[in-house]
């Protein structure tokens, strides 16, 4: 549960409220407390003044102590660097000794004193033999003054007997005055035998200048004391006297004298209370911020625990198999759903690598190649399909998707797989394929019926008219009531009807063979005008044609579109006489916006054919375009089915309704509008 800390604090604040009835003793106590505070302020002002002086003294003492430790650290580092060079000189010869700041074979000393220019004045190798060679500077100091000779010999004895680095100096000039030059010797022993020592002449003043950072010299100066008998500078004008720090270099008595450069500016005592108050407020704000941070951390921890619990529950309840493996193909994790899918326990699969136990034996090589490909590059968005073999032997069809398994820094550790059992889907697909095959067989039978019924439907009228013209012509020829000039129009009309019948056969043949559409730019306005003229010749019912001023074009097969328009117009002229009013039919062609596919908001061509017949009953509209369904006595029910097939082949749709103007049936064909060529 979330802690009720705010409520507890509220109770504490309530208990700390002052009493309402104050006695005289309380008033006197408060006055005494006020006097105590005033006295404390006065004492605090005096304390701050003395504390500032003591603090300044302690600060300068700490600076001197830091300087002493810094000097010891860097000179110990120089001794280590020279010990490294002494070993090299003993093993490889004195000629391998590098110049200060340089090394050989990538092992250059890295100490500050070795790298700084002017600190190491000279260096070389002195063998343990009595007549061993020594650097020229060593020999020069030996002969320059007797005290130098004594100090250098003592240095050799100390180094040889104590087996440690030591110093000698400061060296004196010819007149006996001490200089800042000191010799450092570092021995090298082969077991217990002294091989020699690496010596270096050091400029101590230059070393001190190198060691002192700029921030240290802002408030004090440092002087190298080479003669212990030298008197310190006059400290009468200094707030605090100079300090001397011993350099602690064995064999020397060198010291560093720290001279303060005046007192530091002290804070004004009168603002101390403001600073203290601000500090208190800052502490309170910090505590409040810390408390808020702790509360937030607790909330985050609770959310994290809830998320972990949710993820664990999801993993236990999910039916999709989850599998994690590293870049070598070794399984790291599997969930319960995956174990159920393959029939193996989690401990049997963790740590397993190819060939995995759930791979079918007859597909092992193929799956292994696919397995290596997945480890290299994962799977695409579509995933991969394969078969697993359950422990009991039955096959499981699965769909696998892989995603990279990465660490917090983005390094890929392996792959996380989601494995979906698609066995039921596969069986459903196989069943659907079988059903589709049966449907295609039925479709072929329906297509044969469509061809036969269409031929009968379309050829009935032209062949009947052709027979009527032929019988009439024969009767008049027998009666001798027709001349040659009257015979010619009749024969021409019979030829037109024969040509029309041939066109019907050609259209039906092309449609029955399901050939590819011969898509061209078709002037639908001209096509409708031509069809209406042809249909009107065989019917007495007037057919009104309403066309736009500008031609409309579509992308389609002219032969099939003509067949579509011919069927719709023929139906309208056939049904119009069955109405109560004088028969009439109307063909309208217009362009209008359409939200249906594939127009998708663009303009489409709407071909509307209406009549004033009885119309299509409401209960028959849902099946009016089905094959072999007809509301006309003796009709085969194929004309409108063919119209729907042609419309859908041109990515359009056909609708049926009631015309608001004529009151009869209204058939509307919507086709995508094409650009004018």
Image: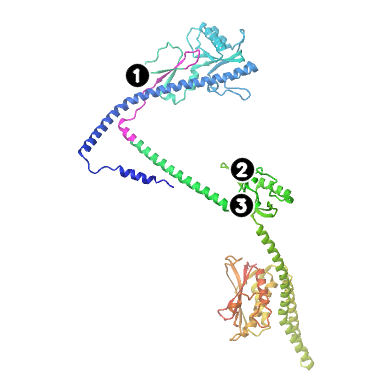
Screen quadrant of the C terminus: bottom right
- Residue farthest toward the front in the current orientation of the protein: 392
Comes first in the chain, label 1 or label 2: 1
Can you see residue 566? no
Quarter of the image holding residue 58?
top left
Q: Dot 3: what SS?
A: helix
Quarter of the image holding residue 242?
top left
Above or below: residue 409 compared with residue 151: below
User: x, y (%) of residue 346?
Assistant: 62, 47
Does the residue at mark 2 contact the one at mark 3 (Cβ under 8 Å)?
no
Q: CA distance from mark 2 to mark 3?
A: 23 Å
User: x, y (%) of residue 328?
Assistant: 66, 42
Which stretch is magenta? 247-276
Q: Is residue 262 magenta?
A: yes
For the residue pair 116 and 446, the one nearer the viewer reads as 446
Can you see residue 544? yes
Q: Residue at x 72, y 66 (%)?
A: 437
Above or below: residue 427 compared with residue 335: below
Figure coloring: rainbow
Q: Dot 2: what SS?
A: strand
Pointer 3 residue = 337
User: x, y (%) of residue 410?
Assistant: 58, 43
Mark in front: 1 vs 2: 2
Pointer 2 residue = 413
Pointer 1 residue = 237
Comes first in the chain, label 2 or label 3: 3
Q: CA distance from mark 1 to mark 2?
A: 71 Å
User: x, y (%) of residue 560?
Assistant: 69, 72
Comes first in the chain, label 3 or label 1: 1
- Residue farthest toward the left in the current orientation of the protein: 24
């Amino acid at each position: 549960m979330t802690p009720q800390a705010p409520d507890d604090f509220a109770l504490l604040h309530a208990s700390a409220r002052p009493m309402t009835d104050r006695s005289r003793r309380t008033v006197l106590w408060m006055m005494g407390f006020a006097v105590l505070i005033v006295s404390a302020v006065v004492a605090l002002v005096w304390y701050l003044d003395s504390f500032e002086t003591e603090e300044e003294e302690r600060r300068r003492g700490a600076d001197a102590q830091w300087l002493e430790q810094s000097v010891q650290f860097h000179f110990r580092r120089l001794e280590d660097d020279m010990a490294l060079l002494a070993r090299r000189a003993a093993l490889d010869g004195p000629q391998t000794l590098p110049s200060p700041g340089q090394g050989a074979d990538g092992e250059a000393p890295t100490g500050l004193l070795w790298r700084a220019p002017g600190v190491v004045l000279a260096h070389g190798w002195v063998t343990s033999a009595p007549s061993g060679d020594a650097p020229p500077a060593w020999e020069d100091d030996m002969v320059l003054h007797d005290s130098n000779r004594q100090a250098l010999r003592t240095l050799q004895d100390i180094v040889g007997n104590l087996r440690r680095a030591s110093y000698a100096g400061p060296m004196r000039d010819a007149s006996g005055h001490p200089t800042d030059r000191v010799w450092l010797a570092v021995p090298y022993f082969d077991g217990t035998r002294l091989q020699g020592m690496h010596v270096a002449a050091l400029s101590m003043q230059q070393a001190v200048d190198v060691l002192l950072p700029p921030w240290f010299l802002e408030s004090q100066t440092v002087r190298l004391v080479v003669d212990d008998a030298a008197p310190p500078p006059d400290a009468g004008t200094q707030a605090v006297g100079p300090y001397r720090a011993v350099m602690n270099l064995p064999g020397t008595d060198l010291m560093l004298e720290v001279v303060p450069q005046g007192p530091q500016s002290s804070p004004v005592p009168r603002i101390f209370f403001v600073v203290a108050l601000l500090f208190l407020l800052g502490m309170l704000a910090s505590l409040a911020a810390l408390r808020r941070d702790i509360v937030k951390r607790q909330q985050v921890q609770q959310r994290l625990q809830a998320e972990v619990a949710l993820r664990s529950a999801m993993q236990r309840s999910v039916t999709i198999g989850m599998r994690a493996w590293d870049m070598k193909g070794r399984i790291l994790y599997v969930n319960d759903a995956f174990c159920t899918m393959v029939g193996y326990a989690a401990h049997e699969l963790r740590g397993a690598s190819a060939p995995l136990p759930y791979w079918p034996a007859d597909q092992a090589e193929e799956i292994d190649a696919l397995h290596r490909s997945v480890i290299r590059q994962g799977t695409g968005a579509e995933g991969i399909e394969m078969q697993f073999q359950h422990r009991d032997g039955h096959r499981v069809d699965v769909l696998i998707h892989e995603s990279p398994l990465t660490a917090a820094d983005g390094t890929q550790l392996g792959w996380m797989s989601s494995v979906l059992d698609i066995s039921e889907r596969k069986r459903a697909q196989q069943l659907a394929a079988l059903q589709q095959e049966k449907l295609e067989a039925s479709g072929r039978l329906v297509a044969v019926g469509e061809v036969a019924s269409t031929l009968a439907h379309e050829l009935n009228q032209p062949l009947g008219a052709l027979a009527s013209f032929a019988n009439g012509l024969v009767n008049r020829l027998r009666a001798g009531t027709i001349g040659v000039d009257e015979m010619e129009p009749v024969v021409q009309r019979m030829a037109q009807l024969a040509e029309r019948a041939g066109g019907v056969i050609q259209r039906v043949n092309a449609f029955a063979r399901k050939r590819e559409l011969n898509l061209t730019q078709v002037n639908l306005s001209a096509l409708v005008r031509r069809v209406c003229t042809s249909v009107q010749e065989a019917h007495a019912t007037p057919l009104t044609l309403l066309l736009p001023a500008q031609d409309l074009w579509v992308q389609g097969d002219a032969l099939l579109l003509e067949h579509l328009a011919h069927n719709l117009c023929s139906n309208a002229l056939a049904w119009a006489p069955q109405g109560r009013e004088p028969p009439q039919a109307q063909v309208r062609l217009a362009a209008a916006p359409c939200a249906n596919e594939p127009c998708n908001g663009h303009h489409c061509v709407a071909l509307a054919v209406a009549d004033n017949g009885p119309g299509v009953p409401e209960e028959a509209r849902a099946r009016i375009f089905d094959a072999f369904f007809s509301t006309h006595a003796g009709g085969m029910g194929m004309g409108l089915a063919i119209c729907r097939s042609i419309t859908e082949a041109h990515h359009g749709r056909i609708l049926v309704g009631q015309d608001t103007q004529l009151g009869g049936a209204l058939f509307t064909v919507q086709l995508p509008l094409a650009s004018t060529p």
